[in-house]
Amino acid sequence: AQSVTQPDIHITVSEGASLELRCNYSYGATPYLFWYVQSPGQGLQLLLKYFSGDTLVQGIKGFEAEFKRSQSSFNLRKPSVHWSDAAEYFCAVGAWGGDDKIIFGKGTRLHILP
Amino acid sequence: DAMVIQNPRYQVTQFGKPVTLSCSQTLNHNVMYWYQQKSSQAPKLLFHYYDKDFNNEADTPDNFQSRRPNTSFCFLDIRSPGLGDAAMYLCATSRDAGRVSQYFGPGTRLLVL
């Protein structure tokens, strides 16, 4: 069965600094991968997804993520964070081959210092 | 704009009093999902509908039921809410099953008194 690990529960960065949020997945076949963001009291918004092809994917709000099969990772990056990026970030993995559900990691809460 | 709508955004109910949460979508997606998300936790899938086919997760309590009367609407019924059912309930949709993205509504925050 697939699973997702987000090793960092909280991350604090200064506004304008670069950001990397870690995500490791476990799945026997080629996964499809997502990053979602959730602001307090809100639903989840899709930032980006990887299904196949180019391993560096661009998303909304200036985010990107890189799929590394050898490391079973799908880390999220942003070169310069803004105070509005403070939120909870969830990595998720779906199964290739028709399973119609995805599994979420436990999330990383991002704090931004002014 | 096409979207997933959840009503109400906040719901207060009493211990044991049945409650229904509503989700509608204008995306014309085939699949609708209900997730439960407790504080500082990942969303947990309760069940989903592929068109009219209902798929229940093995560990979803019998206290939780769902109805999908048409493509656009899906309801979550909690027959006898307990204090442990207080959570954010998220509705999501996807165009199809498998390798597709899910689109989430804003959620309904349920408080059980």
Image (cartoon, coloured by chain):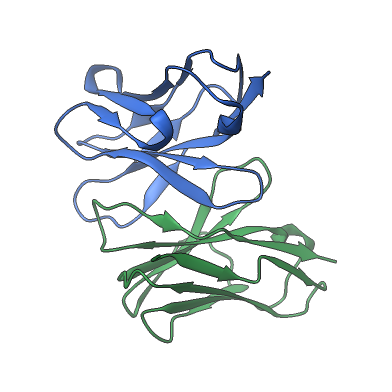
Chain colours: A blue, B green
Which residue does the image show at 26% across and 63% down from the upper left? Answer: B96
**Looking at the figure, which quarter contains the N terminus of chain A?**
top left
Q: From this viewpoint, which residue is outermost toward the left?
A: A53
Q: Position of residue A65 (x, y in %)?
A: 33, 26
How many numbered tags mark residues here? 0
Image quarter (top left, top right, bottom left or bottom right) of the C terminus of chain A: top right
Q: Nearer the viewer, residue A36 or B3?
A: B3
Q: Is residue B65 left or right of residue B15?
A: left
Horizontal relation, residue B81 to residue A10: left or right = right
Quarter where residue B8 is shown: bottom right
Query: Residue A88: x and y, percent?
Result: 57, 36
Is residue B61 among the parts visible in the rendering? yes
Q: Is residue A106 visible?
A: no
Residue A113 position, x and y percent, is 67, 18
Q: Looking at this rendering, what residue extends furthest in the bottom direction?
A: B69
Q: Can you tell which quarter of the image residue B32 is in?
A: bottom left
Q: Residue at (46%, 47%) from the top-left corner?
A: A45
Residue at the location (19% across, 51% down)? A97
Q: Say if B57 sits above or below A89 in the image.
A: below
Q: Nearer the viewer, residue B90 or A94?
A: B90
Residue ID at (39%, 85%) = B70
Q: In the image, residue B10 lies at what x, y percent?
A: 71, 65
Q: Is residue B39 above or below residue A72?
A: below
User: Which residue in the rendered view is the most extreme toward the right?
Assistant: B113
